[in-house]
Image (cartoon, helix red, strand yellow):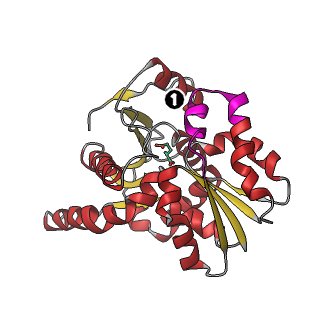
Amino acid sequence: MRIGIFDSGLGGLIIAKATRKAMPEYDYVYLGDTKRVPYGNRSHEAVYEFTKEAVNYLFKKENCAIVIIACNTSSARALRRIQQEYLVNYNHTRKIMGESERKILGVLIPTAEECAKYKRVGILGTLGTINSNTFPKEIKKINKKTIVFQNPTPMLVPLIEEGEKVLAKQFIKKYLKPFLNKKLDAVALGCTHYPFYKNEIKKVLGKKVRVISQDEIIPKKLKNYFARHPEIEKKLAKNRKAKILVTDITPNIKKLSQKWFGKNTRPELIHL
Ligand code: DGL
């Protein structure tokens, strides 16, 4: 069986690449919903439906034992409901058929766990993620004393996808400005794309502020999860294979997937 990694688009490739580097032995399948990206400004219902369709595809068609929802917007707005409604039913049916359970993990809780180690934390994310208030809620569940500041950064995803560095740097300064007088200990990059500009963000924040970046924390958390769940780990194939599925292919999608995942990347078109 495989490890599935899902994102609204291609940003999650940054997390997929880091995870594959940390655990190259497994077989991975990445699914980017490039036809319907961005999710950041969509309704709860739309994000839920789209995410559910993608997870269902990865379970049924790609034989994934576990799916990582690399999209923060999906993790913030849909994950809990998907686990409580869709996954419970899915696993119930599998049990009746004598088959093993599947798992879904998001990127938000592992990130919240890192944030909860600090007193004063800033969160950057899409409008959907920030408006859902999920980061502060989850951080407070772990550490009531952590003070959380949030700022939506809606322009960063399109600028990163366009490779527009000069403008992106200007927006980074603008979006980080409200954080600069808050005496923050850490800032979490709560969106798949932002690790791409980690260094620029670090420069603006200065050395005293830790930047919590999901490409650094998710591979470690997943490794740890497998150590605690050998029943899942032992089901995983170890052929060192990876494939990328997308719901739309354009020249830009080919270019970005090669830039973010490697020169030999050939995205395959699928329909959800
Ligand atoms: N993948 C999304 C996230 O991490 C960013 C792109 C989008 O808006 O869909 O929130």
Q: Main secondary structure of the magenta part?
A: helix
The quarter of the rendered structure image containing the C terminus is top left
Locate residue 82, reporting x and y percent. 32, 61
Q: Is residue 213 a member of the stretch shown in magenta? A: no
Going by the image, does 29 lie left or right of 111? left
Q: Nearer the viewer, residue 43 or 213?
A: 43
Q: Is residue 145 above or below residue 179?
A: below
| Residue 168 belongs to the span the image colors magenta | yes
Residue 198 visible? no
The reply to whether residue 88 is in sight is yes
> Residue reaching furthest bottom?
144
Residue 209: image x %, image y %? 79, 59
Which residue is label 1 attached to? Answer: 257
Q: Is mark 1 within 8 Å of ligand 1?
A: no
Residue 263 horizontal/vertical position (percent): 56, 23
User: Judging from the image, what secondary structure is the residue with disc 1 in?
Assistant: helix
Toward the right, the furthest residue is: 207
Residue plotted at (73% across, 36% down)? 169
Which of the pair 257/24 is nearer the observer? 257
Q: Residue at x 53, y 57 (%)?
A: 130
**Residue 197 falls left or right of residue 248:** right
Residue that lies at the very extreme toward the left in this rendered image: 96
Q: Quadrant of residue 224?
A: bottom right
Decide which of 223, 210 is in the foreground and name it.
210
**Residue 165 horizontal/vertical position (percent):** 70, 29
* 59 left or right of 114 in image: left
Q: Residue at x 60, y 45 (%)?
A: 18
- Give the amino acid at mark 1: Ser
Question: 224 left or right of 120?
Answer: left
Q: Please give the range of residues in magenta.
A: 152-169
